[in-house]
Image: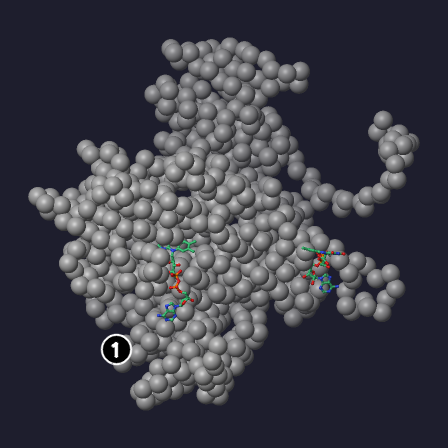
Amino acid sequence: MSEFYADMRDIRFNLFDFLKLGDLKKHERFAHADPELISDILDMAFQQAAEVLYPINEIGDRVGAKLVDGKVVMPPGFKEAYKTYSESGWTGLSVDPEHGGQGLPFVCHLATQELFTAANVNFMFTPGLTHGAMGLIAEFGTADQKATYVEKMVTGEWAGTMCLTEPQAGTAVPDLKSTATPIEGREGFYKIKGQKIFISSGDHELTDNIIHLYLARVEGDPPGAKGVSLFVVPKYRVEGGKAGAFNDISTVALEEKLGLHGSATCQLSFGDNDDCEGWLLGGQGNGLKCMFKMMNEARIAVGIQGVGLPAFAYEKALRYSKERVQGSRVSDMKKKDADRVAIIEHPDVRRMLLRVKAISQAGRAMLYYGAYCFDNHLVAADEKESAHWMHQLEILTPIIKAWCSDEGFNACVEALQVFGGYGYIKEYGVEQLLRDAKIASIYEGTNGIQAMDLLGRKVARGGGVMMRTMLGEVTKFIEGPAKEGPLQGEVVALGKATAALGQVAMSFGQTMMKGDVDYPMMHATGFLQMFGDVIGSWLLTSQATIAQTKLDERLSAKGIDANDQAELTTYLQDDADARFWHGKVQSARFFANQILPRVRARAAQVKTEDRSALNVVF
Amino acid sequence: MKILVAFKRVIDPDARIKLTADRSGVDTDSVEYKANPFCENALEEALQIAEEHDGEVVLVSAGGPDIDKTIRAGLALGAERAIRVEIEDTVLDSDLAARVFAAVYKEEEPDIFFFGKQAIDSDNNQCGQLVAEYLGLPQACFASEVVIDDDGEVATVTREVDGGLETIALTLPAVITADLRLNTPRFAKLPDIMKAGRKTIDVMDLDDLDIEDTALKIELVSLEEPSARQAGVKVGSIDELVDKLKNEARAL
Ligand SMILES: Cc1cc2nc3c(=O)[nH]c(=O)nc-3n(C[C@H](O)[C@H](O)[C@H](O)COP(=O)(O)OP(=O)(O)OC[C@H]3O[C@@H](n4cnc5c(N)ncnc54)[C@H](O)[C@@H]3O)c2cc1C
Ligand SMILES: Cc1cc2nc3c(=O)[nH]c(=O)nc-3n(C[C@H](O)[C@H](O)[C@H](O)COP(=O)(O)OP(=O)(O)OC[C@H]3O[C@@H](n4cnc5c(N)ncnc54)[C@H](O)[C@@H]3O)c2cc1C
């Protein structure tokens, strides 16, 4: 069995050197968030990812979740691992102490989740959804509802799900048919009836109870979004704080799918015998509003999959490429009996490796930055400062969700390519990462919907304040000291790309003013990618300036001549810190020079005014 | 019942290490550290015994402030407090470590003093034995099972010895060193990691402890990298293999 690897240096660099997490300590809310403590927590998270979750990853994929006599049976080892995971308290890391959590910054939660997700994304569905469902109850629940559910979910004793999707209501959630009928004499309680599909962790034997967060329409309420309400529907009714009578919820089927075999994607039937009860949460007709409030967090959480999986695929590909001997150096082409070399010596393989690394690191930087905006908004001194962070978070949310999941999946494809035929077969586990990564572009709002959210709502809202705030941060960097530093070429490239992005946004605005929304929306996905590329390059280049300074200090302390490539290469092989900093600079350069030019190519595509996709008759 | 556990920090065994230019030691600029795995077994056993016999577990380690991170990891697992004897890592050999620990024993007077059977950095396998000798205590090394009687007076220890297993009974207080098969160390819980930062690590100076002999018995002359592995040869048949083993390698 292969081992689990993660780039702990990059995770720490993001948190401590780039985001300077220690500064959050000055706020009372985060006074306990010592960098030392957080670093200890990361070590523990890595250990559990490697020793508890990863060893059952492959078996989760091969055996899968199964439906046996109407009950879901999870893959071997999942139950024991769930116990360890829950008892360790991971779900509560950033949860308010009032609800039994540790109240640490959200970005720390994400960093630990990235490790767990990379090690075993299938396993993480149950704790991940429990976290989301718990969050809804903690935010919108009455005192009674919170007392009944929240702590049990923070400790993982009970699990949670999100029940939105129905056969005719996928993207169009308000088209749902589930109904809720008031139970006479019991204020807030309703009889629930309906079919839900694609419900992740919809049933399992990991916990004594499963708390479904369920969208339905109260009888007589209007069609459309305004008539949607949210309910808490437990698998077993809660009696005296314990799981009691069965609540008439049955598992009709499990989906067979491309990946995620170890995650139970359930078709659930509620109230077949008219005996399913739900408890209204957040007020009648407020179902979608409540869901929307949790959206930023949930969508950012999906970004984790678009970072953790390719990051691990990179670690695997890197190690493989150092071992696999094939062919000789192109520069030795004319030599007879040229040495056979490890494939990492081949320029094309190096290109693939650095691409996967740069994409993963850009995704991580984006993901953590978004979460950091969220944390800062929580402790902002005034409304203005709070808005400064929220505007960035709002516009970054669809980008983090869609850019990370699309680029992350593509990066998994490239990592697999490094293995040649050995990537396509199961032996090295990289094909599983690829299959498991695909879902992130589909659920929690498809990436097409994210792109429309970005272009249709976020860019235009408030006279464009979100985009201005976000690009204002980028511009600050472009015009700051970095433009004279060692990465000045990359800074210039970023400046040009940012300008192109701004121009495209303007031209879309004008087109839409003229009443043509189809043309911009046809480019929405491309626009989101442009935006993501700019953000990625901004973050990687700013990180690289920090890394370069650290590298220079180390090299001069050791008396190494940075201009002597041979001496530098030899030195870097033995100094893991220096190698990491040097690598950060190369990632940033690669991104700015090999990926960022897409932005201007996309801008050119928009300029063509080509309407073929709209005009074609299929 | 009070249990003292020696808890040592070692360089991550998976890390690639290199020597300093003068070969006097390992270049520690960018190495990562972990707790010695055998010490983790020792701590786990101590925690289990303490849970059963309502005891207190105290960690003891020797080194500079940079080992506090490893000590905190031990505190997060459930030890109540820790003692760090301030001493430069590089000026410690097994004998001095043992004298330091013996002195700490006298301050704390525990019922059991647990060690790992050896540390995976220098692999000396001496500390526990020396401490027992200096204190005149009974010792049981390489323990794979430890049972403490209800009165907390006798430890029955199964030891992994060359010929198999040996079971002995010791009157407490005693020194026990842990082997890997003794138990499976637990994982720290998040709330305990949070609490670990608030637990005390008492720092003692060498001078605070009454140690007569602080001389090093081992002089480090120099360190060498292991020589690079020679390329192997492929053999055509089992006969050829046996022949090579016999006549070239002289292993048979
Ligand atoms: C493995 C898995 C786990 C899931 N887990 C859950 C879960 O736990 N809970 C839950 O409620 N759901 C879950 N889902 C459902 C998931 O959220 C939906 O599949 C998703 O919302 C898309 O809906 P759909 O599949 O009906 O696709 P459709 O809505 O039919 O979309 C098909 C295509 O059309 C596009 N499209 C649709 N409408 C528009 C529009 N208005 N404008 C432009 N393009 C549009 C989409 O972008 C997409 O490309 C899960 C799905 C899977 C596969
Ligand atoms: C499903 C399947 C069916 C197959 N069917 C057949 C079959 O019917 N008959 C048959 O003979 N074979 C078959 N193969 C084998 C297939 O052709 C090889 O897997 C393929 O040639 C790649 O070789 P490899 O897997 O050893 O990868 P490697 O050669 O090890 O390549 C690994 C990576 O290194 C790169 N690389 C290697 N050498 C160089 C170089 N000199 N310069 C730059 N980059 C380099 C590659 O591009 C690749 O990205 C099959 C493989 C699979 C997975």
Residue pictured at 57% horizontal, 17% vertical: B159
Q: Position of residue B93 (x, y in %)?
A: 59, 32
Q: Position of residue A173 (x, y in %)?
A: 30, 61
Depth check, front residue: B69 or A303: A303
Q: Is residue A158 above or below residue A501?
A: above
Q: Left of B47 or right of it: where is A554?
A: right
Depth check, front residue: B204 or B141: B141
Subunit of label 1: A
Residue A173 appearing in the image: yes
Residue A486 appearing in the image: no
Local packing at callout 1 (Cα closer than 10 Å; few below 14, some 14-19, many 20+) is few
Q: Amino acid at mark 1?
A: Gly
Residue pictured at 56% horizontal, 75% vertical: A593
Q: Position of residue A469 (x, y in %)?
A: 32, 75
Q: How many numbered marks are there? A: 1
Farthest left residue? A185
Residue pictured at 24% horizontal, 61% vertical: A288
Quickly name the residue at label 1: A462
Corner quadrant of residue A123: top left
